[in-house]
Image: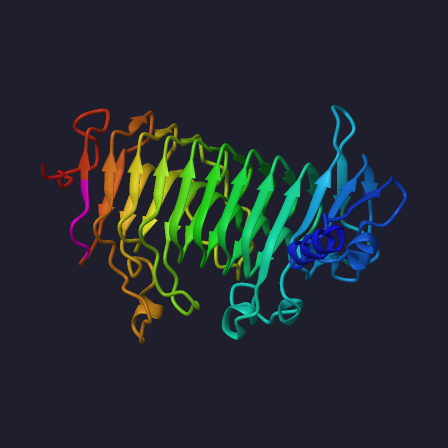
Amino acid sequence: MACTLIGLLGLSLIGVPARAATVVVHAGESIQAAIDAASEGTTIAVEPGVYQETGATRALTVTKSGIRLIGRSKPGQPVVVEQAGSQTQGIWVSPTDTLDPADVELPPCGVSGQRLNGFNLRGFTVQGFAGFGVYLACVDGFTIRNNTAQANQTYAIFPVRSSHGRITGNTTSGTLTDACLYVGQDDDVVVRGNQASDCQIGLQIENSTHVRFVENLSENNTAGMIVDILNGRQVKVVSDNRVTRNVLRNNNRPNPAPPGEETHDLQPGIGIVIDGADRTLVAGNTISGNQLAGMTLVDFCLDRPTECSGPLDIDPNPDDNRILRNTFDGNAVDVIYLPAGGQGNCFAGNKPNPLTGGPLPACGS
């Protein structure tokens, strides 16, 4: 009988994974070496210190599913990953076919179908990279929580072609040419309780669906937030996104992007831009102190005559966006409304009433 029970117990354990390993990295050791040695699902706990890794273009590279990078930061004792040598990228997470893409917004994994399942980043300070602080491509099920990304010149945190993600409690600052917190060509991402300041764009949703930006602070950027569509991307829509209970204030930083950058012509002083997006809910936000406009709701072709003279693979018109119960205060004008052929956009319950910059279409009952 005992042998039978032992045999049954053995059978019951078949297919049950062993407990995932935890590896500790101490100051002076290599985080990348721990990543390279880790199996999928490993937790890599990193003790406080300043880490300069030896990669030529990327400080840290993750190409395995389920890796958890946990910084054991303490007050006054951060876990810092900073630029060294020729590195342009900070923490890079993607399948192996997307380590050196010709265009970071057109990752090969977005076409090939290669994916990573699961990634967690917590407690790190990532700083001083000319490209990305944190870049994720084709990652399903990710969490980026309680990190600082500062003085990374292009983007601070950038998930692309990814899904089912959570970005919470991060502090981002100091980009020169693009966004602090960017969600591009993604689906089902929650961005909650973050801070974005001194960036070209504080917060951004681009060619994405079912993204929720909730209770974030965006201040002292060139533009507070942009929800937009771009031509020539792998995902062709930006729709069904929610922007709720955020503070978008004093976004008047002069534009530092040099000529030739896509964002060089971005005008300072706008709280939130809705550009060609569909079915965006903008509700319960405080939009204040922006010296050009609290909000602009415009079509994609408004300031792109050359691009729009040729074929487009997107619908350029903003449709069915709802602007509800927001507070506008101290902006040069509350709303600039130029939807071209866009339909179904509406405004209700906003303060002051009426908003300046109208007339604006009211929402039906």
Viewer-proximal residue among 355 and 13: 13
Q: Name the quarter where the C terminus is drawn.
A: top left
Q: Residue at x 40, y 58 (%)?
A: 207
Q: Position of residue 245 (x, y in %)?
A: 37, 30
Counting every numbered tag in the picture gives 0
- Asked whether 259 or 145 is in front, the reply is 145
Q: Is residue 67 or residue 158 the one in the foreground?
A: 67
Please give the range of residues in magenta. Answer: 342-346
User: Which residue appears farthest toward the front when viewing the image?
Assistant: 1
Across and down, in percent, residue 343 comes to: 16, 53
Q: Is residue 112 magenta?
A: no
Q: Position of residue 138 (x, y in %)?
A: 55, 61
Q: Does residue 137 sit above or below 188 in this rendering?
A: below
The answer to whether 63 appears left or right of 140 in the picture is right
> Looking at the image, which residue is at 36% across and 39% down?
243
Could one spot residue 177 in this view of the protein?
A: no
Horizontal relation, residue 29 to residue 237: left or right = right
What residue is at 17 percent from the left and 58 percent from the top? 341
Vertical placement of residue 215 versus 342, above or below? above
Identify the residue at image location x=31%, y=76%.
311
Q: Is 331 placed left or right of 224 in the picture?
A: left
| Image coordinates for residue 87, horizontal then vertical, percent | 75, 57
| Residue 107 in sight | yes
Q: Quadrant of residue 121?
A: top right
Dominant SS in magenta:
loop
Q: With respect to residue 221, does 305 lie above or below?
A: below
